[in-house]
């Protein structure tokens, strides 16, 4: 296509229109990330902040511990373990959200048009509601003196309260509760457009309900499932408030460890290195998902 | 569609157990919230699970709480400023990235604008903390609440941008061409044709920006200086040491504000979709 003078003028005008947004995103998004990358290669100052001196110490201490007497390095898996725990929590949360979210989205998409909007609103409200408040609400329910334990105690099912708060179970429950709407809405969006004549064709060919579901509906809902998986995995992998409130500090996830380095531990370079590794893992996971969805579409 | 979907005597849409899972899921989503709401009206002096009768005393005591009032004012100042700026900037960006011949750098622009959506909030939070402390040190100035407003504006922009862009994408460009044919200049076309048509998208984007800013905890907690306490930070400071239903009242109020804006945004989004179809 030929590029005319007008086209070039248009392009310049559009760039000018978009420039305030670009400028804000660069100054408050990309440059701060660059600062974190730079900080991760520096030395911590005594009271927070950094000393501008090049050092790989932060990345080394991700995997090794330096002996304070003879300066030798020995392998230490402590941080690795937290990354692994975070990845496991993220993966289980995503799987559980899919397990609950898919049937829910399917059920919503098969309602009559008039009631569908109401269902969407019911899921949209928690989708956008205050995460801190919702997490506190979960805390109230699973406390020792909370609703579940009081009811079970009153009914005489248990003799003393079951400890649920400050356990791995509490963190998982909180994560699933927080992020399941992020799974439901994208799947719903792709199922809403589903042409049920395709399912009918499947039944005509003597497919069972389960076969129709797994061979026709789920493959066609794949874009929604992938989007949902990304939307759940990214915030649960970077979760900060949920483990802090429901895990009670004894079950750290990587988000809390990062905040800790920038807070009371006053090791900004280490916190920066943690952040960079977290970003890289998430980018790889997202890219992998997108690639997989691409293959599905072409194959 | 409905008659096509019914296949003889069996319903092709039915999947056993899905309705049950959906019902459990929605109930589970609302149950904790409803319990917090219910116990905010509990006439008891502790957060225990026993019901002592209906009372609005905790709301009254909350409204008389100076700290609550101050943080509510700060939250509103920050959220309104961030919403106005994010919406204006996002509207301009949306106009620049839709309905026109693709220009060089357009894809990169969209990517930059939506980039906060794939960065975990804790990483944004520490990077903003590092950035502001770096600039403050280099220039020897302190930002006060300006840094809260700036940070909130930046993470609100994608939330304002996306609904406005989707509204623009569904809009009929011939109306604007007609205005131009009638010798309306660019500004008058925008003012009298584009803008009124775009308004539902802008409202929906602004409502989402307001919620996202008003509810933000992680980023605000890391970058806020002493005394800069927004409502979520005030709530946080009270979790461990408040043992009265006042905490429930606080949660309920915060939730109600979110829900009001969610419903506004939802109605405008629906309006978009209905007009398109």
Image (cartoon, coloured by chain):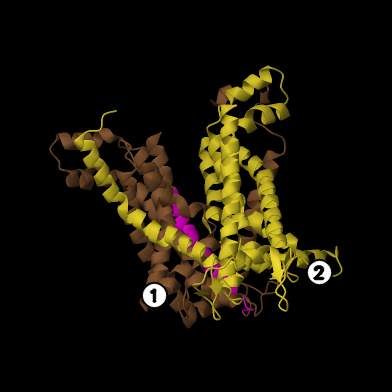
Chain colours: A yellow, B brown
| Image quadrant occupied by the N terminus of chain A | top left
Q: Residue at horizontal 65%, vertical 52%?
A: B27
Q: Nearer the viewer, residue B113 or A222?
A: B113
Q: Position of residue A160 (x, y in %)?
A: 84, 70
Q: Position of residue A120 (x, y in %)?
A: 53, 45
Q: Nearer the viewer, residue A114 or A289?
A: A289
Query: Is residue B202 found left or right of B26 in the rendered image?
Result: left
Return the mark for residue B138. 1
Q: Residue at horizontal 82%, vertical 67%?
A: A153
The quadrant in which residue A119 appears is top right
Q: CA distance from mark 1 to mark 2?
A: 55 Å
The subunit letter for the residue under badge 1 reads B
Where is mark 2, residue-wise?
A: A161
Q: Position of residue B121 (x, y in %)?
A: 53, 60
Q: Return the residue found at the far left.
A: B183
Q: Return the residue found at the far top.
A: A205
The subunit letter for the residue under badge 2 reads A
The quadrant in which residue B154 appears is bottom left
The mark lying in front, picked from 1 and 2, is: 1
Does the segment drawn in magenta span residue B263? yes
Please tell me whether residue A112 is drawn above or below residue B159 in the rendered image.
above
Q: For residue A165, say whether it is visible.
A: no
Q: Position of residue A282 (x, y in %)?
A: 59, 52
Does the segment drawn in magenta span residue B85? no
The stretch of residues the image draws in magenta is: B242-266
Q: Are marks 1 and 2 in contact (CB under 8 Å)?
A: no
Disc 1 crowd, CA 10 A, few/some/many (<14, 14-19, 20+) = few
Please tell me whether residue A48 is drawn above or below residue A73 in the rendered image.
below
- The secondary element bearing badge 2 is classed as loop
């Amino acid at each position: 296509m030929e590029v005319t003078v007008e086209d070039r003028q248009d392009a310049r005008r559009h760039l000018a229109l978009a420039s305030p947004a670009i400028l804000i995103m660069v100054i408050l998004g990309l440059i701060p990330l660059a600062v974190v990358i730079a900080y991760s290669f520096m030395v911590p100052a005594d009271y927070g902040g950094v000393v501008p001196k090049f050092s790989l110490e932060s990345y080394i201490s991700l995997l090794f511990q330096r002996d304070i007497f003879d300066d030798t390095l020995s392998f230490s898996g402590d941080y690795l373990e937290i990354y692994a725990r975070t990845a496991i929590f993220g993966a289980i949360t995503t799987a559980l959200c899919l397990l609950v979210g898919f049937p829910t989205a399917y059920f919503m998409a098969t309602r009559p048009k008039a009631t569908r909007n109401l269902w969407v609103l019911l899921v949209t409200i928690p989708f956008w509601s205050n995460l801190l408040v919702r997490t506190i609400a979960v805390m109230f329910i699973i406390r020792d003196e909370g609703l579940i334990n009081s009811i079970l105690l009153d009914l005489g099912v248990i003799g003393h309260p079951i400890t649920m708060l400050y356990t791995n179970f509490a963190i998982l429950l909180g994560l699933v509760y927080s992020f399941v709407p992020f799974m439901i809405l994208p799947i719903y969006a792709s199922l809403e457009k589903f042409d049920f004549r395709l399912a009918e064709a499947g039944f005509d060919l003597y497919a069972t309900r389960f076969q129709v579901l797994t061979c026709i509906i789920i493959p066609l809902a794949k874009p929604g499932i992938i989007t949902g998986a990304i939307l759940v995995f990214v915030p649960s992998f970077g979760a900060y408030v949920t483990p802090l409130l429901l895990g009670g500090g004894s079950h750290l996830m990587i988000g809390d460890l990062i905040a800790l380095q920038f807070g009371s531990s006053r090791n900004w370079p280490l916190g920066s290195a943690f952040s960079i590794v977290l970003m890289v893992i998430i980018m790889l996971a997202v890219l992998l998902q997108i690639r997989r969805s691409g293959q599905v579409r072409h194959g | 569609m409905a008659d096509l979907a019914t296949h003889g005597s069996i319903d092709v849409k039915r999947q056993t157990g899905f309705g049950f899972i959906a019902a459990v899921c929605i109930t589970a989503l609302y149950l904790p919230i409803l319990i917090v709401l219910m116990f905010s009206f509990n006439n008891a002096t502790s957060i225990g699970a026993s019901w002592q009768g209906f009372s609005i005393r905790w709301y009254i005591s909350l409204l008389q709480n100076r700290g609550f009032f101050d943080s509510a004012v700060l939250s509103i100042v920050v959220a309104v400023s961030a919403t106005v700026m994010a919406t204006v900037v996002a509207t301009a960006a949306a106009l620049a990235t839709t309905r026109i011949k693709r220009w060089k750098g357009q894809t990169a622009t969209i990517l930059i604008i939506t980039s906060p959506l794939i960065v975990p909030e804790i990483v944004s939070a520490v990077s903003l903390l590092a950035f502001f402390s770096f600039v403050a040190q280099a220039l020897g100035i302190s930002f006060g609440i300006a840094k809260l407003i700036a940070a909130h504006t930046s993470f609100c922009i994608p939330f304002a941008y996306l609904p406005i862009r989707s509204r623009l994408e569904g809009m009929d460009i011939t109306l604007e061409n007609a205005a131009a044919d009638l010798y309306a200049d660019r500004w008058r076309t925008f003012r009298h044709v584009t803008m009124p048509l775009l308004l539902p998208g802008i409202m929906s984007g602004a409502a989402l920006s307001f919620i996202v800013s008003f509810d933000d905890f992680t980023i605000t907690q890391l970058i806020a200086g002493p005394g800069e306490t927004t409502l979520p930070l005030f709530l946080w400071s009270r979790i461990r040491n408040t043992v009265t239903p006042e905490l429930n009242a606080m949660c309920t109020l915060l939730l109600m504000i979110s829900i009001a804006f969610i419903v506004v945004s939802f109605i405008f989004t629906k309006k978009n979709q209905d007009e398109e179809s």
